[in-house]
Image (cartoon, rainbow, N blue to C red):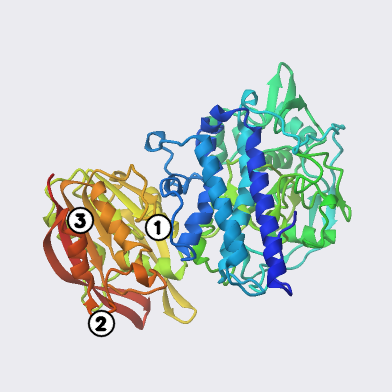
Amino acid sequence: MYPVRLDGESVEEKRREIKEYFNNTYNLYEKVFELLKDESVFYKKSEPTRHPMIFYYGHTATFFINKLINMKIIFQRINPEFESIFAVGVDEMAWDDMEETNYKWPEVSEVKRYRDQVRELVNHLIDTMDFTLPIEDTSAMWIVLMGIEHERIHIETSLVLHRQMPLEFIQEVDEFPICENFSKAVQNELLAMEGSEVVLGKSKKHHLYGWDNEYGEYKERVSSFKVSKYLVSNGEFMEFVQDGGYEKGEYWDKEGQEFLKRSGAKHPHFWIKEGDTYKYRALSKIISMPYSWPVDVNALEAEAFCRYKSKKEGVNYTLPSEAEYRVLYEHSGLQDIPHLHESRANINFYHYGSACPVDEFAFNGIYDVIGNVWQWSSTPIRPFKGFEVHPAYDDFSTPTFDEKHALILGASWASSGNLIMKHSRYAFRKHFFQHAGFRYVVSSAEKKKEEIYETDDLVSQYCEFQYGECYFCVENFALTCSNIALKYCKNFTKALDLGCATGRASFELAKSFEKVEGIDFSARFIGVGVKLRDEGYIAYTTKVEGEIVQNKKVTLEELGYQDIKNKVSFWQGDACNLKPNFSGYDLVLAKNILDRLYNPRLFLESIDKRINEEGILVLTSPYTWQEESTKKEFWIGGYYDAEGNAHKTMAELQRILSEKFELLHTEDIEFVIQETQRKYQHSIAQMSIWRKKGV
């Protein structure tokens, strides 16, 4: 079914629509997992860089709870363990923990019960929460829609993983019928496209849900170009394979050659060679090669084919850019959903649970502008002008703004919800497999490569705060905290930098410790530390005034971290609900997170389990309690009780921690954060240093 519009006349009618959409999504997701032959398959990996299937079964349900908690819509977890282990690990990010020894996966029946509990909670919220129309991104109902659209994404990506699972572990499901039209491949041809002025991006007033990267604006004058009438079919791609395309390095860039070396690929992933012929792995069966269907390849294979075809024909073939694809979309006369009926394209499981011939669905003379399989583009995903992260999901897009994630365009047979909207923007690493293929263009457009500067205001502020200049004679806060903490440590095996932000203290601690783990709630922040460690530099902008910015760059060598960088690892995590493997620390340094936690008491009452005997806990905080971060009933200081008594944070810290910790030292630490060249935040945090008592 189609996504719910954000506008309307009746709140109660909108509740009914959202509830129907939510349950339809939830049911479809569970139907996807019926493809697994038995419960043992839930604990198998179809791809070495992914979790077992049980992770994905639980992940989308825990997403609802974690986002609702994060946005202070609910305050009670259903299952803290599940909401930790199923939280992170879907995109091969450096902070995705794929070490199997760190997980003890629950029974399938337990996860099913958990999913049922989440379903009940979300249905209750839809029935009872206050909201107005149109639904805006500040509304609590937006978070419910976010959870629904997130699960729609995983309907499709889980099907890719199931399709990669050995066939012996997969069974057929009636709801995903395979197309039975295996006609011969059609001859592709080039069509002329008139150039035009393209405007990408959408307004916050748009009537359909959107992810953060869709909003804003980008303009480009697209020159006239030629485009393939059809998606590249298995039949058309066969020539590249038979000509030894996978063995000839000249067709592959450096990343492509690394992919070939790592994978040993000699043909597309979903082709199966039997003697001198090829067969095709569909979702739940192996079939004769459907030469007329679009080929399923990753971006590296698509680019290699274009180089091969260019050399063979003496014409410069490339993948279309995002802007060129928009020209196709406008040429096709397509209307956005809900006006586009799903019968017009191979989308949303309406026709098949597979691809179909590339000449089945035409749009004003060009085929499969949307649907059938996604189309790789030549454009790395980048933010539009005016981009802003959504606070509930600040790492949906920003980790992909690294010039390594290529946009896929146009949706597939398994796409639904936001995935089939005109303005949707999804990107994957080039070696990833999706239900994706490609079409090619002949274009004179120059493909732009951009230097990546961190432009997110908050992240840039923290880059400067941790790696930049000192202001008003106030020493670097991360260095000061690290140096003081080290004076009280007896053992130097393992340290935790909790609330590590962009990672400066993590690197500093690694000068003394054998191993340092930096954890932050925000992947936007830890991505900076990862980039510095892995690429040797970070680049960011600081605001001068208004739109004027200054570009800055800091290198690992300048900081003196070359020899200790491999001691540091960064992870995304919730300080109030860390995974069990984050333990055994001689030092936990928790900088300025206490008054930002949704349940600081829970954190304080459980942190001792992470620390070795005689280990050190260092807390710093300016105690700026505010309800935006912590509901007032969870404050541990900064308030008057019913009798008018003032409760200060330090006294409550002593009360909570004194049973298991000895207070060693307190002092005030200044810090300065630059907002612009003429505006600064000058604050004072109180540092308290605690030693864990022996048993």
Mark 3 and mark 1 residues within 8 Å of each other at the beta carbon: no
- Residue visible at 76% across and 45% down in the picture: 349
Q: Give the residue displayed 82% in from the left and 50% down from the top.
A: 345
In the rendered structure, the answer to whether residue 401 lies left or right of residue 520 reads right
Vertical relation: 581 (above or below) 673: above
Mark whose residue sits in front, 3 or 2: 2
37 to 507, vertically: above or below: above
Number of residues whose C-alpha sits closer than 10 Å to that of mark 1, classed few (under 14), some (14–19) or many (20 or more): some
> Which residue bears the numbered disc 3?
617
Q: Position of residue 499 (x, y in %)?
A: 33, 59
Residue 579 lies left or right of residue 237; in this view the side is left
Quadrant position of residue 105: top left
Picture residue at 43% right of the left edge, 39% below the top: 98
The amino acid beneath tag 2 is Gly
Tag 1 or tag 3, which sits nearer the N-term?
Answer: 1
For disc 2, the neighbor class at 10 Å (few under 14, some 14 to 19, many from 20) is few
Residue identifier under label 2: 644
Work out how far the residue at label 3 is from the one at label 1, CA to CA, in angstroms.
19 Å
Determine whether, in the image, residue 263 is placed left or right of residue 277. left
Q: Element at badge 2?
A: loop
The image quadrant of residue 188 is: top right
Residue 486 placement (x, y as % from top left): 15, 55
Q: Residue 657's quadrant in the figure? A: bottom left
The front one of 20 and 540 is 20
Q: Residues within 10 Å of mark 3 (few under 14, many from 20)?
A: many
Q: Earlier in the sequence, mark 3 or mark 2?
A: 3
Q: How many marks?
A: 3
Q: To which residue does mark 1 refer?
A: 521
